[in-house]
Image: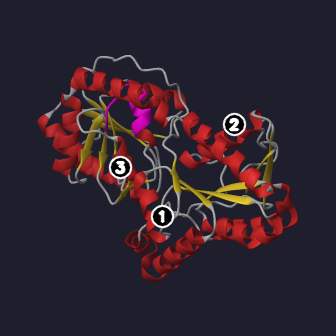
Amino acid sequence: MYDCLFPWTVGGAERWYRALAERLASEGHEVTYVTLLQWDEGDEPNLPGVEVVALGRKRRPLYDGEGKRKLGPPLFFGWATLWWLLRRGRRFDVVHTASFPFFSMLSLAVAWPVGRYRILCDWHEVWSKDYWREYLGPLGGRIGWSVQWLTAKVPQRSFAFSRLHGDRLRAIVPGREVVHLTGEYAGSLEPPQPTAAPSTPHIVYAGRYIPEKRVPSLVPAIAWARERRPDLRATLLGDGHERQQVIDEVAGAGLQDVVTLPGFVSAEEVDATFAACSVVVQPSAREGYGMVVVESAARGVPVVVAEADDNAAVELVEDGVNGFVAADTSPAVLGQALLDAIDGGDALRASTCDWFARNAERLSLGRSLDILDEVYGREARARHA
């Protein structure tokens, strides 16, 4: 149960729940994927062996003009899932969902006396009080934190994809067992072959242009680094609310011929751009996992991330082994981290390949799905008992 479905919306959680549904269906389980309507007539999803239930009669944009989640769609999804579960909840041994958007999780709790299903909940992120206030303001942040707290108190089997957010959940619910799922990577586990670093230093970013990604901070860092490496170039893939700000930053720094902004491109072009670059950078302030680190390492390319209170991606980076963690996003600090990755050259690329080879199985989607297979069996048996 999740309000998004890949590829109609794109993100780590979307890929995770689709892969989970398809894996369970392939093993002969009866699987229903409950989501919001996101597609036009004639473009309905076809997941082999999976019943897809789309709630609502019209598509509801999930994000506002600033790239923040709207309140309306989660409220509707929570209300709609409540009535759907009251009618059909008794069918299921297990209902698996995400903590966010919280209202559907609360609906699971309200409808539980009727359905008596086992509740499994993924905590991709647990926001701090400070971050809630920053995101929604003093009043909205207090309400958001309270709803998150209430969701955490619902009896559930909990999962987290990072130590950071697992520890935060245990702080809210002392004594809660939180299963750490280490893998979300669905690509090939074959160790990449080291390739030579490009002769022209090339920095790449790929993602949305929204405040928590801190994309505008890249431009001053690139300018700082280019003062020391005049041949350096950059490609910033993606789009979003802050795109115009990035364009203005590039123009203000006189980097129009240095920084390329192609917007969203095909998966094939993303793959080719990653494979040919010197370093991938993700300056995000908030990440629940850090898929870009794994995807970069799978291509033998080091990555630079930035330290932040809500950034779990730093857990996947070993300084000097598969990339670097910048202490902040100031031009000199982030710029120096980028230069360190570029100067690492062939040796750092070979080390990154070795890091992926050693960690691929642990970080694979298959590993997490294997753990869930065991949990599903136990929960289903407990429900029938």
Residue 76 in sight in this render: no
Q: Label 3, on which residue?
A: 247
Q: CA distance from mark 1 to mark 3?
A: 39 Å
User: Quarter holding the C terminus?
Assistant: bottom right
Q: Is residue 298 magenta?
A: yes
**Crowding near pointer 3: few (<14 within 10 Å), some, many (20+)?**
some
Q: What whole-number distance in Å separates the C-alpha atoms at marks 1 and 2?
A: 27 Å
Q: Earlier in the sequence, mark 3 or mark 2?
A: 2
- The image quarter containing residue 325 is top left
Write down the quadrant of residue 132 in the picture: bottom left
Question: Where does the magenta region start and end?
Answer: 293-303
Q: Which mark is first along the chain, 2 or 1?
A: 2
The amino acid pointed to by label 3 is Ile
Q: Which mark is residue 23?
A: 2
Kind of residue indicated by mark 2: Arg
In the depicted structure, whether residue 56 falls above or below residue 375: below
Instruction: Give the residue furthest to the left.
Output: 228
Q: Residue 157 appears in which quarter of the rendering?
A: bottom right
Q: Is residue 171 shown in magenta?
A: no
The image position of residue 166, as x and y in percent, is 46, 57
Q: Earlier in the sequence, mark 1 or mark 3?
A: 1
Q: Which residue is mark 1?
A: 169
Question: What label sits on residue 267 in the rendered view?
Answer: none
Viewer-side residue, 317 vs 94? 94
Q: Residues within 10 Å of mark 1 (few under 14, many from 20)?
A: many
